[in-house]
Image (tube, rainbow, N blue to C red):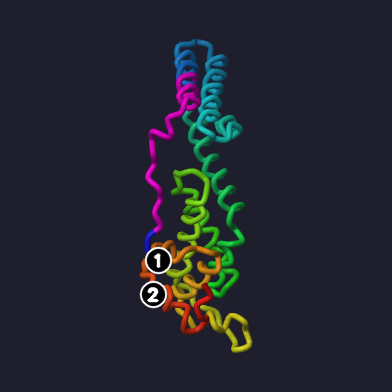
Amino acid sequence: MACDVPQPDWRRGITARRVGSAVGAGALAAVAIVLSTAQVANLLFLGAGLLFAAGFGIPVTTAAEVGDHPVGKLIAALAGRQQMLTSQVRGRLLATVTGVVGDVTLDEVRAARLVEQAIEQTAARWRGPIGSDLDTYLLCCAARLAVSDAWRDPPIGEDDPRVSLARLSRRDRAVWALRRCEVSDAHIAHMLDCSAEEIIAAVSPVLGDER
């Protein structure tokens, strides 16, 4: 099973704003290096870090929070970007992803842990824009984690409304859950590394073809 991260397009990343902020930050840092007054140099380094962070869409407040060394500020700013992306990912699709993973694992507690793991994994790996591709990637990561999870399924009684799902394999449950989220069969096949015929066969015997 594979979840593809879009390859970064460096040409799209070269914008006038980013170039200007990088040049400006470099100039401030160069002036700070040649200054003999430590206090002024530190202020210039701080200004360079904030200018760089603003140009590249990194939370600028983070750059002022860690230490006095410009490298430390840059590392903190990059960490702040991942935190921001984590928040964005969680806000965009949390309920949908939780529903999918819950239908696959049939365990709410386990599903919550796997969802957080999928969100962290997505935030750490994603380099593309925030949009539908990110949503698809997150769903893919979450479904893959749920299908491959070694945690045993909980016991499901015959009067439980999820009993029909319990009769399916985890991959088949994932197919059914993703279909409910209006994910196309082509995307599901790619996420779960299966064919379109296998997708139809996964849900038809027990649940019927709902689409």
- Find the distance from the CA under tag 2 to the CA under tag 1: 8 Å
- Residue farthest toward the front in the current orientation of the protein: 211
Q: Earlier in the sequence, mark 2 or mark 1?
A: 1
169 vs 39: above or below: below
Q: Which residue is mark 1?
A: 189
Q: Residue 67: x percent and y percent?
A: 55, 30
- Magenta residues, as a range? 3-24
Q: Secondary structure at mark 2?
A: helix
Residue 173 % position (x, y):
49, 74
Q: Residue at x 59, y 30 (%)?
A: 64
User: Circle 1 — which element?
Assistant: helix
Q: From the viewer's perspective, is 65 left or right of 32? A: right
In the image, residue 139 sits, relative to residue 102, either above or below, namely: above
- Residue 201 lies, with reference to residue 25, above or below; the image says below
Nearer to us in this view, 39 or 102:
102
**Viewer-proximal residue, 23 or 130?**
130
At a point 50% along the width and 23% down the height, the residue shown is 21
How many C-alpha atoms fall within 10 Å of the one at disc 2: few (<14), some, or many (≥20)?
few
